[in-house]
Image (tube, rainbow, N blue to C red):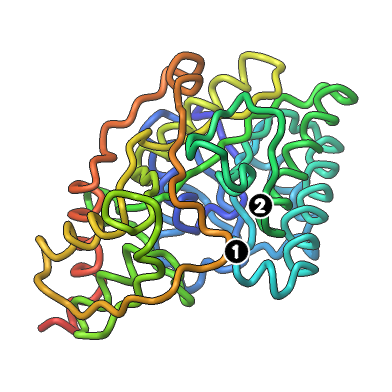
Amino acid sequence: MKKSVLVVGGAGYVGSHTAKQLTKNGFTPVVLDRDIKTKPWATQYGPAFECNLPRDIDFLKEIVHRYNIDSCIHFAAHTQVGESVRDPSKYYKNNVIMTVQLLDKLREIGVNKFVFSSSAAVYGVPANGIAEDDATDLQPINPYGRSKLMVENILKDYYVAYGLSSISLRYFNAAGADNDSEIGELRENESHIIPLAIEAAFQSKEFQLFGTDFDTPDGTCIRDYVHVTDLAVAHVLALQKVSGNVICEQYNLGSSTGTSNQQLLDTIKKYIGEFKIAKMPKRAGDPPILIANTDRAKSELGWKTEHSTIDNIVCTAVKWYNNINKKDLN
């Protein structure tokens, strides 16, 4: 029998890619998500259930017992930085309080292995632009980043008090799409630069580029983009590690390569052609450079990036856009 894993938020972008990788590696992902009706891919890798936490939290006991589950990967969270500044209550209630309720219910029903979807936002603005995952002076600069760091600290306390085994995975810029174009990045309110730029290029819209006067070679900020398939593989490796050890660790997941916004847009132009770009003032709090040091993920998880060149990220994202917009393009 395949080992079943509870995947909370498994119909989302990274969650659905991870569900596919779990299936490839002999696991059965059991997906819980607030919205599976509008996401046809949610049910293609394993059982999927519409579940709104914390309202439906008692439903967890039935699912865990039905599928003999002893581990959980937790993706469900609000993720927009700007919104977190405007409405911090929403982020602390959902990202922190709901996660505590989830953890307590899982402990109650015997699930004590946990992989947490964290974020590079826990770092704030590293002095030299390089985020070190063994740093102890983390200073997130917005409620979203603080909510993720709060959960990481809660997991440390739960490890000491209850023996909960956990790994927190700090994503940098998740990007790209499944190589088979079965799943990809699709949100009702998109905020990520790659899908926004691709849509602008295809629909002849003006794309807003925030900041052209950073202290970088071309004046645009430099970020670390990691392909979503590489992220998904890391979750499988993290699950295997927490299943064999009682630990509490945090790892960066990035390509360890910086790509400027201008380089990114130039790569998109290579695949789609020229499009209008409006140069906008830089946003408050945007660091000029943010790149991951991933040495520990490589040495301790055995993780490596195989899909995360910026060319492949853009290529798969464009292919996915074409796939989901065939009617519009014909």
Identify the element where label 1 is drawn: helix
Q: Nearer the viewer, residue 35 or 253?
A: 253
Q: Quadrant of residue 136?
A: top right
Q: Quadrant of residue 56?
A: bottom right
| Residue 134, percent from left and from top | 62, 24
Identify the element where label 2 is drawn: helix
| Residue 21, percent from left and from top | 39, 38
Tell me if I can see residue 68 in this picture: no
Kind of residue indicated by mark 1: Val
Q: Nearer the viewer, residue 93 or 183?
A: 93
Residue in the picture at 45% in, 14% down: 299
Q: Which residue is mark 2?
A: 145
Residue in the picture at 34% in, 65% down: 212
User: From what the image shows, is residue 287 above or below residue 6?
Assistant: below
Instruction: Please indicate whether residue 311 sits to the left or right of residue 110 in the image.
Output: left
Quadrant of image for the C terminus: bottom left
Residue in the picture at 46% in, 44% down: 290
Tell me if I can see residue 281 in this picture: yes
| Residue 67, percent from left and from top | 63, 39
Instruction: Please indicate whether residue 305 sits to the left or right of residue 35 in the image.
Output: left
| Residue 74, percent from left and from top | 63, 45
Residue placed furthest toward the right: 161
N-term mark: 2 or 1: 1
User: From what the image shows, is residue 38 above or below residue 11?
Assistant: below
Instruction: Please indicate whether residue 120 sits to the left or right of residue 246 in the image.
Output: left
Q: CA distance from mark 2 to mark 1?
A: 8 Å
Q: Which residue is mark 1?
A: 81
Residue in the picture at 76% in, 50% down: 99
Question: Callout 2 environment at 10 Å: few (<14), some (14 to 19), or many (20+)?
Answer: many
